[in-house]
Image: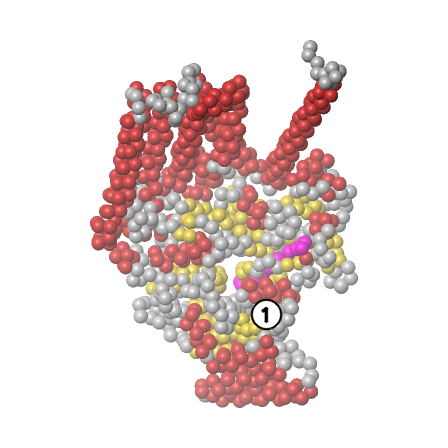
């Protein structure tokens, strides 16, 4: 055995010692890498296990475990099948490459590098190939598993359709095929094409590295065996491409080439034949690649590919463009008439707007007798804008800074035997508002829930201009369960723990001393259980306090996904949701109601709509079919989620009911108290109105010319001299529609001609039981001039009385804000109501309702209250200021003078009407207010509460 010696002949042990040290370093590094890999694997496993287990527990909490497992096994099946197919394709290709490695390779600099690679890799190939293929297939399978929705619809939609009346006229298929079957078929085709392309690229690269392809060698650059292999792969690619052309024919039914969505003249007479031809050419090319196996060179497949490319350019692009320009464009109406007719019929059905406007002859003015006969409508006119009322609630009803009102909703309730329109907002807890900042115990154990809701009548205010809360919608559930808001629209922390040793804050003590505490008694949440479950939750939320806190015991429960906009879509992610979930008190409990839609963008010939453009909200996506098929209801105390099917005839929801039978509940099983609070959704109504503005016309020439097209009115600014962007949103109102004998709660949307301000029609959507979802449209005769929103706003701003009042109200830096201008149909006439708010300068501005403007028949009246303004507009003297529901004298000098001016203006109107008694009463009231203002100015006394509406 040779030994290392130094220059004196002595044995040199340093080399051997150095080798041992290096070996020890290598071993340490190896174990360090192994340890790192083990820790990383444990972390990945814990992350996956915690996410999986927590989701399973949550689905068990809401009683939708079968939904969890159906989705889980569908994803596993898809991932396994597509991953397995890709693994087989790639592994078989790489094994083929290895078997086709040439034994003799002429020497060259290129080959020298390749040979080094082959010598280094070849000994490990039998292990490397399956490992490499498995890793790639794993990622492919994970990506494919995301297609579980289209897969389940494809598998479960047999026998469900729209009926013979809606079969498309081109391919004679039910729309269900395009909406339920085609998406998954197109995914499979696209996936196969991409998979084969990638496998072919990898095969070509592998052949190059193993010497089967030699780019720098003279003569034959590809061995015959490699040529066979690549020819087969390329032939398969072309077969799949032919299938893609075949499926691409169906895309013509949602084509946007023509005047409208759907297969146009050019699509039918040029594009469709081109796709059929491309199918044939692609099949021929595939055959040429297979036939070329027996021939030398690549001349046949190259000619085939060239023919396919030429056909695609000439027949697929140039010819349709020529037909469109030289045949269709010069006589577009005549060529496109049958296709426009198909689009009109399909769009009206797909958006549920297949209705004919009813003619209405508008009267010039509203009469006092009509006001009396429609008292239920007049007394429920909404003066408060939701955003303004939210600011007021935040300032006056917040109680503590950790409470918030996120939204204010409009609904109706039976109060003292009468249906009244009410505005309601839940008082929710915001952990970000905890005094001193939220500690873990405060944020997760103490401040766990909001408390109660605030409700206001829509048409009144108290003497200070604040909303009149003279109604009670008591939650009568035991132990305050109807009042406590554990689930809502706010969720500053991902979880709270209840049933711990720490009592929760219920609400501040009304006496001002301390607070009242509570302990959660509901069935919501997930039991935290023992150490293992707590550890998984702690890891899931990256919060070790869940594991180590001594305040959590075996009886504690963790409440997660408390934000309803997370909770509901987690259970049913395949539905689209409205932007405005709303709170309601039902049978003594606070619940959240959220409208859900079934949508598609594949309904043949139906118009494609951008939801963001149609609704002026951040809804994402293009749709050409939309139904409000589901109402999601969440209990604010225990988080129970129910999905009520309100449109059972919708084929889309039928498919999802087939897939998840236990997820949905028929609407006829919903409690009547809950059904009474179902509203027709705003986003759907605005989308339908957006489409109906164009598709109310069914005559093709008229539709093509757009001569009778309508538009949604432009939104009105809230600032007196401001500008607004977007269109006027529909609003809820209680009214008696033409031809009806009783009032109903409806959504209302007016229409104007494009670019003009007058109103030409309006649409309503019913919300009451028995009338829910009934769309009705009313159109005015041509030539009738009915004021639209912008015209009414101009009348208000130009009126000298209103102008003087706005000037007085804006003194001392106060901001004057317009509320929502409401158009209220009163039989065949219209009453326009414009509330005016004032916000005083300060850190916490509180909008106060100070004036109400009423317009009808061109007459503008302004007063302190709705009742006074209506009385004034009909020449009736309002109650004297000393009593009754009218304004109470008081306020600042400017307020008193403003009230005096109102009385002088009323006196002038009564004098013109010949009502001398009312004239004298107004003059007396004005003089009394001027005297009070003078006394106040001299004494500098503190002002009494300023007047505001009360009627």
Give the vertical position of 470 relative to 133 (above or below). below
Residue 197 pos. (x, y %):
41, 31
Q: Which residues are magenta?
A: 418-432
Of 561 and 950, nearer the camera is: 561
Task: Name the residue tied to disc 1.
Answer: 847
Is residue 423 within the magenta segment?
yes
Give the vertical position of 820 relative to 648 (above or below). below
In what element is the residue under mark 1?
Answer: strand
Of 328 and 851, nearer the camera is: 328
In terms of secondary structure, what is the magenta stretch mainly?
Answer: strand
Q: Is residue 185 left or right of residue 330?
A: right
The N terminus lies in quadrant: top right
Residue at 30% from the left image edge and 24% from the top image edge: 297
Q: Is residue 799 left or right of residue 752?
A: right
> Residue pushed farthest front?
8
The C terminus lies in quadrant: bottom right
Of 159 and 940, nearer the camera is: 940
Is residue 320 within the magenta segment?
no
């Amino acid at each position: 055995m040779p030994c290392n010696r130094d220059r004196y002949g002595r044995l040199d042990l340093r080399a051997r010692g150095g080798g041992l040290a290096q070996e020890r370093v290598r071993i340490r590094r190896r174990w360090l890498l192994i340890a790192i890999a083990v820790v990383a694997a444990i972390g990945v496993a814990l992350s996956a296990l915690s996410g999986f287990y927590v989701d399973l527990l949550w689905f068990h909490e809401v009683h939708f475990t079968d939904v969890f497992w159906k989705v889980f096994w569908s994803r596993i099946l898809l991932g396994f099948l597509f991953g397995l197919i890709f693994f087989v394709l790639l592994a078989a290709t790489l094994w083929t490459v290895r078997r086709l490695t040439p034994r003799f390779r002429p020497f060259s600099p290129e080959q020298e590098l390749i040979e080094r690679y082959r010598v280094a890799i070849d000994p490990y190939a039998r292990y490397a190939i399956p490992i490499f293929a498995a890793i790639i297939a794993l990622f492919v399978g994970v990506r494919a598993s995301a297609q579980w929705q289209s897969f389940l619809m494809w598998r479960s939609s047999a026998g469900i359709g729209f009926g013979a009346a809606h079969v498309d006229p081109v391919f004679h298929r039910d729309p269900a095929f395009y909406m339920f079957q085609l998406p998954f078929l197109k995914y499979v085709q696209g996936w196969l094409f991409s998979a084969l392309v990638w496998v072919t690229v990898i095969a070509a690269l592998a052949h190059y590295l193993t010497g089967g392809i030699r780019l720098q060698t003279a003569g034959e650059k590809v061995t015959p065996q490699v040529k066979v292999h690549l020819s087969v792969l390329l032939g398969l690619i072309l077969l799949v491409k032919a299938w893609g052309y075949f499926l691409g024919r169906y895309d013509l039914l949602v084509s946007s080439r023509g005047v409208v969505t759907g297969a146009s003249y050019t699509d039918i007479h040029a594009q469709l034949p081109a796709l059929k031809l491309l199918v044939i050419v692609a099949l021929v090319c595939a055959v040429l690649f297979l036939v070329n196996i027996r021939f030398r060179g690549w001349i046949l497949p190259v000619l085939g590919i060239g023919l396919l490319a030429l056909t695609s350019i000439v027949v697929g692009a140039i010819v349709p463009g020529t037909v469109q320009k030289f045949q269709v464009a010069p006589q577009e109406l005549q060529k496109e008439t049958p296709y426009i007719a198909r689009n009109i019929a399909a769009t009206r059905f797909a958006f549920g707007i297949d209705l004919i406007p009813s003619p209405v002859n508008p009267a010039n003015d509203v009469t006092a007798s009509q006001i009396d006969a429609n008292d239920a409508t007049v007394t429920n006119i909404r003066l408060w804008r939701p955003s303004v009322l939210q600011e007021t609630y935040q300032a006056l009803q917040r109680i503590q800074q950790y409470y918030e009102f996120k939204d204010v909703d409009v609904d109706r309730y039976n109060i003292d035997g009468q249906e009244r329109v009410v505005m309601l907002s839940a008082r929710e807890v915001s952990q970000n508002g905890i005094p001193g900042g939220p500690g873990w115990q405060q944020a997760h154990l103490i401040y766990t829930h909001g408390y109660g809701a605030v409700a206001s009548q829509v048409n009144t205010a108290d003497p200070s201009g604040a909303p009149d809360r003279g109604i009670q919608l008591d939650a009568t559930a035991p132990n305050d369960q109807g009042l406590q808001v554990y689930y809502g629209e706010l969720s500053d922390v991902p979880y709270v723990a209840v049933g711990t040793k720490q009592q929760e804050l219920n609400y501040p003590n009304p006496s001002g001393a301390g607070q009242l505490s509570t302990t959660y008694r509901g069935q919501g949440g997930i039991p935290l259980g023992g150490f293992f479950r707590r550890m998984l939750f702690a890891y899931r939320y990256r919060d070790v306090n869940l594991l180590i806190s001594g305040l959590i015991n075996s009886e504690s429960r963790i409440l997660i996904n408390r934000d309803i906009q997370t909770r509901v879509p987690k259970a049913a992610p395949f539905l689209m949701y409205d932007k405005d979930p709303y709170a309601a008190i039902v049978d003594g409990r606070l619940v959240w109601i959220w409208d859900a839609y079934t949508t598609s963008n594949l309904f043949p010939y139906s118009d494609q709509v951008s939801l963001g453009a149609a609704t002026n909200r951040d809804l994402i996506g293009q749709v050409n079919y939309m139904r409000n098929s589901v109402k999601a209801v969440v209990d604010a105390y225990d988080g129970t989620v129910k999905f009520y099917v309100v449109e059972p005839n919708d084929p889309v929801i039928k498919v999802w009911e087939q897939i998840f039978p236990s997820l949905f509940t028929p609407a006829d099983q919903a409690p009547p108290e809950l059904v009474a609070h179902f509203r027709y959704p705003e986003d759907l109504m605005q989308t339908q109105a957006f489409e109906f503005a164009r598709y109310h016309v069914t005559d093709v020439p008229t539709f093509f010319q757009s001569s009778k097209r309508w538009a949604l009115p432009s939104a009105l600014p809230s600032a007196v001299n401001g500008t607004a962007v977007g269109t006027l949103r529909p609003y809820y109102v209680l009214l008696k529609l033409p031809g009806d004998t009783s009032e109903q709660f409806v959504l209302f949307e007016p229409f104007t001609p494009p670019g003009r301000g007058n109103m030409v029609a309006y649409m309503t959507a019913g919300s009451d039981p028995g009338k829910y979802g009934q769309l009705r449209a009313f159109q005015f005769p041509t030539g009738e001039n009915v004021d639209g929103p912008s015209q009414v706003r101009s009348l208000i701003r130009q009126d000298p009385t209103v102008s003087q009042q706005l000037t007085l109200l804006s003194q001392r830096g106060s901001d004057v804000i317009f509320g929502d201008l409401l158009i209220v149909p009163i039989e065949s006439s219209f009453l326009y109501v414009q509330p005016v708010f004032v916000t005083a300068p300060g850190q916490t501005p509180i909008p106060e309702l100070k004036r109400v403007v009423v317009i009808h028949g061109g007459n503008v009246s302004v007063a302190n209250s709705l009742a006074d303004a209506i009385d004034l507009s009909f020449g009736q003297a309002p109650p004297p200021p000393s009593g009754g529901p009218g304004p109470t004298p008081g306020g600042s000098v400017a307020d008193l003078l403003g009230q005096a001016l109102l009385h002088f203006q009323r006196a002038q109107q009564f004098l013109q009407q010949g009502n001398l008694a009312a004239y004298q009463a107004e003059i007396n009231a004005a003089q009394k207010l001027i005297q009070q203002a003078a006394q106040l100015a001299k004494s500098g006394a503190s002002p009494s509460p300023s007047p505001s509406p009360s009627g």
